Amino acid sequence: MLARVTGKLVLCGTPIGNLGDASHRLRLALADADVIYAEDTRRAAKLLSALDVSTPVRSYFVGNERQRSVELSSRLEEGLTAALITDAGMPSIADPGLSAVAAALAVGAGVTVVPGPSAVTAALAVSGLPAERFVFEGFLPRKGKDRAARIGDLASEQRTTVLFSGKSRVVADLKDMADQLDGGRQVVVTRELTKAFEEVWRGSLADAVAHWESQELRGEFTIVLAGAEEQLADFDRIVAAAIDAIESDESLADAVRRLASESGVSRRALYEAVLRKRG
């Protein structure tokens, strides 16, 4: 009985802006692959041209990844090697790629990685904020309860938090965090990391809103938010105390106002958390 032949999926980290950050190993991996799946074939063409790679390219993005993952599975079962790249950074990290890994594992194909530049670690490094432990939140939900809940969770998060944002979202993201969290909380906003117009801004959330509202916004943003002060860590206990007060006939508004004042937590964050807990 012939052994089953399976191929290999190579997750390739690509430059986050500066093509000079492309490694020799990345070029070899892309040149050696039988096919490259790319989030945006036009952007991929620029990278491949710079690296002098002529491997065939197929699109693989959120809108077609279900169909493409089936195609990928077939190619891997044939024993081919497929490379996966996104517009910038590492596939699967706030970018398409998870379905490709699942497809490869389902057919018994090998999965390996060519590491590359990361906006997350680059922003952390230049932020000057503690990075021994951190949280990556990706992009905030655009609206609704999910957005309020995600931001509310940051009220008691003591670890440094990294978020992605874009020119059409960054001011709203900063505003909502300033409203729900402590406006004095320190934040570092980085723009266009590794590119010609790289910018690193430092200050409070409140000052960040004022600054970025007055700017002509361009490019991609990575936000590094300082962790909550230690006295805010027991947020769940404060939420529970508010619920107990309400069940003892104190009004929601009064309980939230009193406990927020006593503990120093954001009144809005506490209000939203109490509503979520009570369904």
Image (cartoon, grey):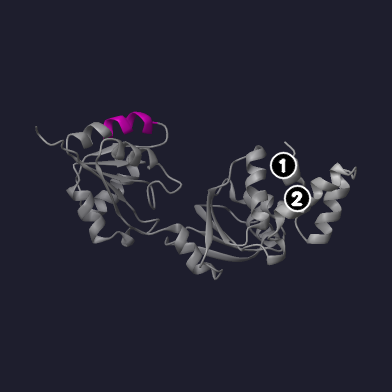
Q: Which residue is mark 2?
A: 239
| Nearest the eye: 199 or 258 | 258
The x, y position of residue 132, in whole percent, is: 51, 68
Q: Is residue 32 left or right of residue 164?
A: left
| Nearest the eye: 180 or 240 | 240
- Asked whether the residues under the numbered discs 1 and 2 touch, taking CB atoms below 8 Å apart as contact, a structural biologist would say yes
Q: Quadrant of the N terminus?
A: top left
The x, y position of residue 27, in whole percent, is: 23, 55
Q: Is 95 rendered above or below residue 28?
A: above
Q: Callout 1: few (<14), some (14-19), or many (20+) C-alpha neighbours within 10 Å?
A: few
The x, y position of residue 230, in whole percent, is: 68, 66
Question: What residue appears at the point 52 percent right and 52 percent down from the top-left corner?
Answer: 218
* Dot 2 amino acid type: Val
Question: What residue appears at the point 85 percent right and 48 percent down from the top-left corner?
Answer: 245
Q: Which residue is mark 1?
A: 277
Q: Secondary structure at mark 1?
A: helix
Among the 4 quarters of the image, the one containing residue 128: bottom right
Q: Magenta span has 229? A: no
Q: Which mark is residue 114?
A: none
| Nearest the eye: 194 or 78 | 78
| Nearest the eye: 197 or 250 | 250
Q: Is residue 198 visible?
A: no
Of labels 1 and 2, earlier in sequence is 2
Q: Callout 2: few (<14), some (14-19), or many (20+) C-alpha neighbours within 10 Å?
A: many
Question: What residue appears at the point 82 percent right and 55 percent down from the top-left corner?
Answer: 259
Q: Is residue 46 left or right of residue 177?
A: left
Question: What residue appears at the point 73 percent right and 50 percent down from the top-left corner?
Answer: 269
- Residue bounds of the magenta highlight: 64-72
Q: Quadrant of the C terminus?
A: top right
Q: Is residue 121 left or right of residue 182?
A: left
The x, y position of residue 144, in whole percent, is: 66, 37
Q: Secondary structure at mark 2?
A: helix
